[in-house]
Amino acid sequence: MDPAAGLPAWAIAAWVTLKLAGLTTLLLLLLGMPLAWWLARTRSPWRVPIGALVALPMVLPPTVLGFYLLIGLAPDGPLGRLAFATGIGNFAFTFEGILFASLLYSLPFVVHPLQAGFAAIPASMLEAAATLRAAPLDRFLSVVLPLSRPALVTASLLGFAHTVGEFGVVLMVGGNIEGETRVLSVLLYDQVEAMAYDEAHALAAGLLMFSFVLLLLMQWLGRRTAVADG
């Protein structure tokens, strides 16, 4: 029996949205921390082009990214052929597909706050830990992460909020499949298209309030963390 059977459309879309945002944020923190650390500390000439590539989704229209991802994830596309060759199967118009798209689209909103937080850590503190024979991983866990708590909070909330607000890239890659790829932003689009303005007003107001509360929480946690560190 389908657990979503009998639930209203907004509840099903909310579950898909929260699942997508939660997984995207968790994976981006795991993948983004090493990348942000490298960008903050490296002197490699590759730093500038890779940094620009990471920031590209901030200025690129989401439909452009979604279009190229859809082409790449198609069965005859490079990513699609790789997925089928490894036994993963089709990615387009699946939850896994929109998760992959969200990872790319929300990447800068997690990496940039982390990069700024890592760059602000004095090198002398890491050198002092090294003189105490702390291994690189120990230094990162015991020195870098505690000092980067405000950046971690900001990165987590921004990544989550940005994923909740995604529309174009999710619609292009995932389509509009209830219980699978239909997120709240796509449901709102459906309601407006169907001229169901009462439902659209209620959903839009809920998303507006959610975004406002999330920003308030981000500022409150940031100040609280800064006071605690001080």
Image: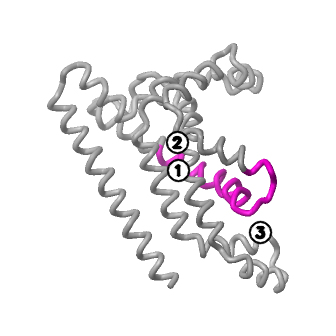
Task: Say what amino acid the circle numbered 1 marks.
Answer: Phe
Q: Where is residue 89 in the image (x, y as percent from the top left)?
A: 66, 22
Q: Earlier in the sequence, mark 3 or mark 2?
A: 2
Which of the numbered marks, if any, corresponds to residue 58?
2
Label 2 packing within 10 angstroms: few (<14), some (14-19), many (20+): few
Under circle 2, the secondary element is helix
- Foreground tag (3 vs 2): 2
Q: Position of residue 107 (x, y in %)?
A: 58, 46
Q: How far apart are marks 3 and 2 (CA)?
A: 31 Å
Q: How many marks?
A: 3
Q: Which of marks 3 and 1 is nearer the N terminus?
A: 1
Task: Say what amino acid the circle numbered 3 marks.
Answer: Leu
In this figure, which residue is indicated by the disc labeled 1? 109
Label 1 packing within 10 angstroms: few (<14), some (14-19), many (20+): many
Under circle 1, the secondary element is helix
Residue nearest the observer in this picture, 70 or 6:
70
The magenta-colored residue range is 21-47
